[in-house]
Amino acid sequence: MKKTIIPFLFIFFALNNISAQELATFFKQSDNFFKANVVNGKVKYAAIKDDTKSLDDILAMAKGVSVSKSDAAQYQAFWINAYNLLVIDGIVKNYPLKSPLDVPGFFDKAKHNIGGKSITLNGIENDLLRAEFPAEARFHFVLVCAGLGCPPIINMAYQPATLNDQLQKQTVLALNNPNFIKVNKNKVQISQLFEWYKGDFEQKGNTVDFINTYRKEQLPEKAKVSYYPYDWSLNETK
């Protein structure tokens, strides 16, 4: 009996160690990629198009990576990075273009092989993240759709150990940005993001309550809220 158990345990721990190493490599290489290709919230699509090797290598490795919801920070960090990388990959494959909406089915039809799944971008956002962690509305400020209407992409990877701080920082930055939350006395214009995902932001009050949770200067109590059109222009830097 012991002879059977020992090899099994050895294989089990060896596979776990390989998986952990793959994840660590994924986060490290993703971090290097974002640092090299993101400037002031915009992406160097033309440069990536000229040399796709680093992005191709990351996504090829990530095909077989396995993450479990039991480690929420690791799971969330992996899928947030995966989403942002796949958006960039989708733009680069169709570059040059003016908007992700120029590509039919960009978010809801095109399938990607990653994390042991074949899944769309909407599937990652809605099924793997929002549905699994419905209380976490801060996802909306870190998943970047390649449009200027999105909160800006950061020049680093999301990491399990720092994920909560990163989610908090990006949410605070977005909701204190006068170009994202436009205040004119008691009139407030906010992104259509808050209209499309209203339920996510109104779990503990109304949308203004959610926004004020992260703002340094509170919105007026009786603010007249309207939505400004979403800007789908490409978040590109030259």
Image (tube, rainbow, N blue to C red):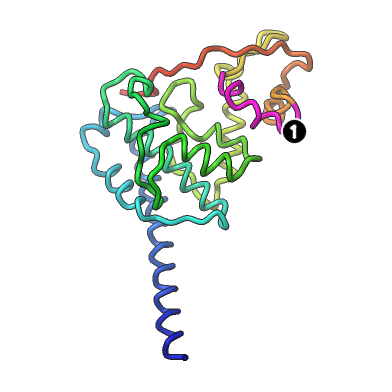
The residue wearing badge 1 is 204
Residue segment shown in magenta: 192-205
The number of numbered discs placed on residues in the rendered structure image is 1
Is 35 on the left-hand or right-hand side of 60?
right
Secondary structure of residue under mark 1 = loop
- Which quadrant holds residue 7? bottom left
Of all residues shown, which one is farthest toward the right?
221
- Give the camera-side residue of 35 and 59: 59
Residue at the spot 70% in from the left edge and 29% down from the top edge: 202
Residue 121 screen position, x and y as percent? 43, 36
Residue at the spot 30% in from the left edge and 23% down from the top edge: 238
Q: Residues within 10 Å of mark 1 (few under 14, many from 20)?
A: few
Residue 108 screen position, x and y as percent? 42, 31
Where 194 sits versus 161, above or below? above
204 inside magenta stretch: yes
Where 184 sits versus 100, above or below? above
Residue 27 screen position, x and y as percent? 42, 50
Which kind of residue does numbered mark 1 sit on?
Lys
Residue 216 screen position, x and y as percent? 69, 26
Residue at the spot 48% in from the left edge and 44% down from the top edge: 158
Is 71 on the left-hand or right-hand side of 39?
right
Where 146 sits versus 186, above or below? below
- Give the camera-side residue of 113 and 53: 113
- Which quadrant holds residue 48? top left
